Image (cartoon, rainbow, N blue to C red):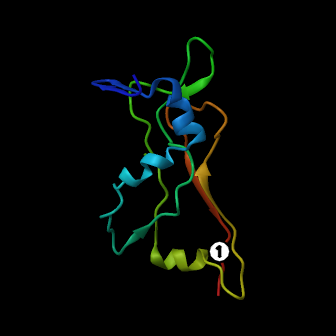
Amino acid sequence: SVVTVETHRFDLHSIHDWFFRLGRGQMVKKYNGELAQVVFGGKLLEESVFFQPSRHYGIAKATGKEEFMKNLCPAWADRVLYNEKLSDLFRHDSFCASGLYYGLVAEKKFVGQHKPVALHATICLK
């Protein structure tokens, strides 16, 4: 079988870890629509997500290596949101080139079921 989805089981079998780690889950990213209707004193924004899901990680008993758990669907549960005013400070313009990183903290190290997400940006003060 290619995929097994049951109560307390989400398993892509031989491609499970590859799909979410190396493939970064991008093929299922279009179904990630939780933020489509988020409004809090204006529209909230998020940078493009090209990192692997931020949860559910575990240690494989057989190998002792980190892997995605197969009892819960991997998800991008940890996010950094900001408003449009702050977004303007992140953007490039002719006077200031800003650098930006949006991704996982400890991507290659086991830190628990959730990996923290960080947004590191250089902002332009005009």
Compared with 26, 107 (above or below) is above
Q: Position of residue 33 (x, y in %)?
A: 35, 56
Q: Quadrant of residue 8?
A: top left
| In the image: residue 24, left or right of residue 78 | right
| Residue visible at 36% across and 59% down in the picture | 35
The quadrant the N terminus occupies is: top left
Residue position for label 1? 123
| Residue visible at 60% across and 39% down in the picture | 22
| In the image: residue 42, left or right of residue 107 | left
| In the image: residue 54, left or right of residue 96 | left
Residue at the outermost left position: 7
Element carrying mark 1: loop
The quadrant the C terminus occupies is: bottom right
Specify whether residue 117 is in view.
yes
Q: Position of residue 27 (x, y in %)?
A: 46, 47
Residue at the outermost front position: 1
Compared with 101, 26 (above or below) is above
Compared with 39, 1 (above or below) is above
> Which one is nearer the viewer's eye here, 68 or 18?
18
Q: Position of residue 29 (x, y in %)?
A: 44, 51
